[in-house]
Structure formats: C-alpha cells, structure tokens
Amino acid sequence: MTTATVTSPDTSSTSGLSWTPRLWGTLIVLCAAMFLDALDVSMVGVALPSIGSELHLSTSTLQWVVSGYVLGYGGLLLLGGRAADLLGRRRVFLVALGAFAAASLIGGLVDDGGLLIAARFLKGVSAAFTAPAGLSIITTTFAEGPARNRALSIYTTCAASGFSLGLVLSGLLTSVGWRWTFLMPVPVALLALVFAVRLLPRPVEERAKGGYDVLGAITGTVTVLLLVFTVTEAQGAGWLSLRTLGSLVVVAVLAAVFLLIESRAAHPLVRLGIFRNGSVAQANLVAFAMAGAYGGFQFVVTLYLQHLLGWSALQMALGLLPAGAFIALSAPFMGPIVDRFGTGRLLPIGLLALVSAFALFLRLDEHSSYLGLVLPSMLLLGVGFALAFPSVNIAATDGVADEEQGLASGLVNTAIQVGTAVVLAGATAMITAGSAGGDSPQAQLDGYRPALVFVTAVALLGLVVAAVGALLEGRRVSAPAPVADYDYQSAGSTTARTEVLSKH
C-alpha cells in the first residue's frame, strides 16, 4: 500500500491561525471544487422543465438528469476516498477535477437526452473522487485543533453554500438559458485546476507493506450503486413491486458479503474498526438524516413555489437567497465558534434549527405569504446548515489517522449522498400518493404535507442522534480514560497523540 506524507514549507505554520498566502490559496482552491460539487447536486432542479421541453424528454427520463449525478456521486464515494489514500490525494484530486470540467462542458453542448444523462453521471463520478480527496488534503495539511477546525469550517460552509445556493443560481441561469447551468462551472473548474497544480502540496510517497482490497472495492461500489439506483427507480416501479423488493434483497445480500470481506481482508477498503470511534459513527448517521431531510424539503419547496404559487425561476431564486447568503456570510466565524463550543453542542442546535424550519413550512396553503412562511423557514435553514454542516464534517474526521482521512471523508460524503437519494425517493412517493394524481391546489397540498412531515421526522431523528452523541461526549469528558487504556490508533495524528501524552 502507498501512503503519502505531505511536506511543504507552508505546513509548519498550520498549527496556528496565521496562515501563509500559499495555505490560503490551497484552501480556496479546495473550497472552489467543493462548492461546484455541492452546487451540482441541487442546481439542475429548476432547469428540468426547460431541459425536458427542448430535448423532448419524458418525465421518467428527465428525472435521470438528477439521478444520474447522484448515482455516480453516491455510488463511488467509498472508492474515491480510498483511492485518495492509496494513489495520492493530490493526483486523484487533479485528475477528477479535470474530468469534472470536461463533463460540464459536454453537458452544456449536447442535444441528446442520453448523452446529457451520461455527462451527468460522469460529473457525479468525478465529484466522488474530488470531494474525499479535497477533504482529506485539508485534514492532513492543517494540524488537528483550532487550525483544522477553522479550515474545515470554511471548507464545509462553502459546500453548504453551494448546496443551498444551487436553486438560486439555477433560477438566475435558467432565465437566460438552461445550458448555462451546465456551462457556468466550466471556467470555475478550469481556473481551480490551474491554481491547484501550482498550490496543492506535493506529497513525498513512502512505500509500506500492504495491498489493494480489490474484491471489497468491487462489492462495496456495486452495493452502493445498486442501492442508489433502486431508491431512485422505486418511484416509477413501485416500492412494493417485485423489481424493487428483489433489488433491495440483493442489496442486503451484497452488503452482508461486503462486511464479511472487510472483516477478513488484510487491508480492507473500509476498516470496520473506524466505527468504534463514536464521533465518526454519530457524524455519519447525522449526515445521512440532515442531507436527506434537506434534499426532500428542497424538492417539496420547488414544486410548491413553482406549481402551486406560480413563482418564476427568478422569483424562486431571490426568495431562497437568504438561506444561502446566511451560510456564506457565516463562513469566517464558524471556526472560532466550533473552538468555543465544540461540535457536540453545535450539532444538536443546528439540527434543531433545521427541524424548526421544516416544521414551520407545514403551515403552507394556497395563499401563503413570503414573509409569513418562506422567509422564516429560509433563515432557520441558514442557521441550521451554518452550524451543523461544518460540525458534522469535523466530527466525521476527528481522531482519524492521517492514512485513513480519505476513507473517513468518503464515508461521510457517502452518507450525505445516499441519505439524499433515499429520503428524496420517499418524499416523492408520498407526494404522488397524497395527491392521488390530481392537479387541483388542494390535491397538491395533500401531497406536499405528508412529504413535509416525513422530512421533518427524518431531521428529528438526526437531532436525537446528535443529542445522544453530545450527552455521551459530556460523560466521556467528565471521566477521562487512563493513559494505559487510550486508543492511540483512534487518536489519529502525531500531534493529537503528543497532546494527550502532555496532558497526562
């Protein structure tokens, strides 16, 4: 196995908060790539009606413009994270970012629905490699503690901004032409690629004994791909259809085989012991619930505002702007806030704000006002994501050894994508069942409300997990383990282990 130790003249200063211009440039490049990855998850939604009209796509085909990206992104994240650890984070990041730019250009130029879906799938695959590689570059470049918290807060806030601003930018660009939703990322990705070549730290490769878990990589990737494919297709095939149930059975069998392989492999794709780190396990569960609930909520809001209230794409873009703007403006302040209060406290508060935002929207009706319904929910959404999204990413990589940072990054990003696919599919099914195929305002409301109850319940589950995690963390802090029992493997970096020894 190949592991990489990053050596750069700039990294010596990462333990403090006074960073060199090169470090800032590195962080900005990684933030730009993550912003584009997150942006693409949500940006196409508003453009779908225009795409379908121009390319003459049916509804079932059109949904794959979204699902194709999610399938590639969610299905290959584990492989992408491990590839970053084994092949080199810098190398994987640069190649994947170039592929992302190429796929974006193709998507903006094609006139065939099949080619468009293929381009979207390729973009998802590219993002599956840039996201964990970028996150692990940060966690191995910036020293664990205030410096890493600050870097991760800025980085993940950019991701949350991209996720929440996707609809806003999509509305603005679609008013000009839907192709611009695909072409806009091209120059940004190319510019980020040019600076990445110059700024990203060059690792010194060190050979170590080991090998590749080929069977685990194949089984794990196929399992996640089939799961995402099944839940995205379940709406059309039916959740209780033989096709869907049979596919879920196959997923369960493949998952069991994957766990068996990983428990016996000498160098597994996913070292199962990583989940003994309570912070990692909790963060992945919260990420699943948080991203899934937001994905379902975003879908309901889009339909409600456009179909029932008759908003234009531009009106919706401006109406949803407060959430994204709040998240973006909060980026410089999140690092100190995380240092002051810790992720254990911020996660439950952030999830509570999200639950409140979703629950508040349950008051929707045929004549809801912007000030009375939409704006309060958007502000709560902004607060929730600003607090929870950086915290969940910090918690997901906290105390993980440098050689497994790509794995930890891949796991949390997989949780986000699979959560989005699963909850979105459930919300879509509830909308269809509740409305009973009717187009009247009341029929639409009868579909939206159950879906909102569902996404609120999912977010509430995430809140419970976060609150329990905070309670357990408080107990661990009040009763520290003796030095002899301390798990140095879980402690992660040399810096962290040195700090532990100095405290004892």
Image (cartoon, rainbow, N blue to C red):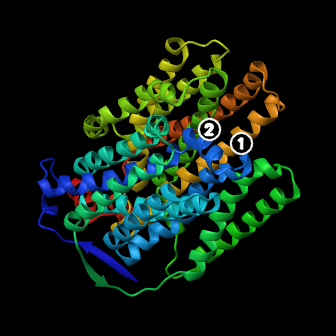
Residue 445 placement (x, y as % from top left): 73, 22
Residue 368's place in the image compared with 470, above or below, is above
Q: Please say if 57 is above or below 484.
A: above
* Picture layout, residue 418 above or below residue 207: above
Nearest to N terminus: mark 2 or mark 1 = 2
Point out residue 490 in the picture as x, y percentages from the top left corner. Answer: 40, 62
Give the quadrant of the C terminus.
bottom left
Q: Secondary structure at mark 1?
A: helix
Instruction: Name the one closer to the observer, 490 or 374.
Output: 374
Above or below for 180 versus 1:
above
What residue is rendered at 54% in x and 40% in y?
A: 290
Q: Position of residue 484 (x, y in %)?
A: 35, 64
In this picture, residue 107 sits left or right of residue 4: right
Nearer-the-camera pick, 66 or 214 = 66
Give how far across and how far down residue 359 sits, in percent: 60, 23
Q: Which residue is mark 1?
A: 426
Amino acid type of the residue that numbered disc 1 sits on in the rendered structure: Gly
In the image: residue 195, left or right of residue 30: left
- In whole angstroms, how far apart are the C-alphas of marks 2 and 1? 8 Å
Task: Name the quadrant containing residue 85.
Answer: bottom left
Residue extending farthest right: 242
Q: Is residue 489 visible?
A: no
In the rendered image, is residue 164 in sight?
A: yes
Asked if the residues shown at circle 2 and circle 1 are in contact, with their CB atoms under 8 angstroms apart, the answer is yes
Q: Residue at x 64, y 18 (%)?
A: 364
Give the residue number, with chain letter if any, for mark 2.
296
Residue under the image location 62 percent in, 38 percent down: 296
Name the element at disc 2: helix
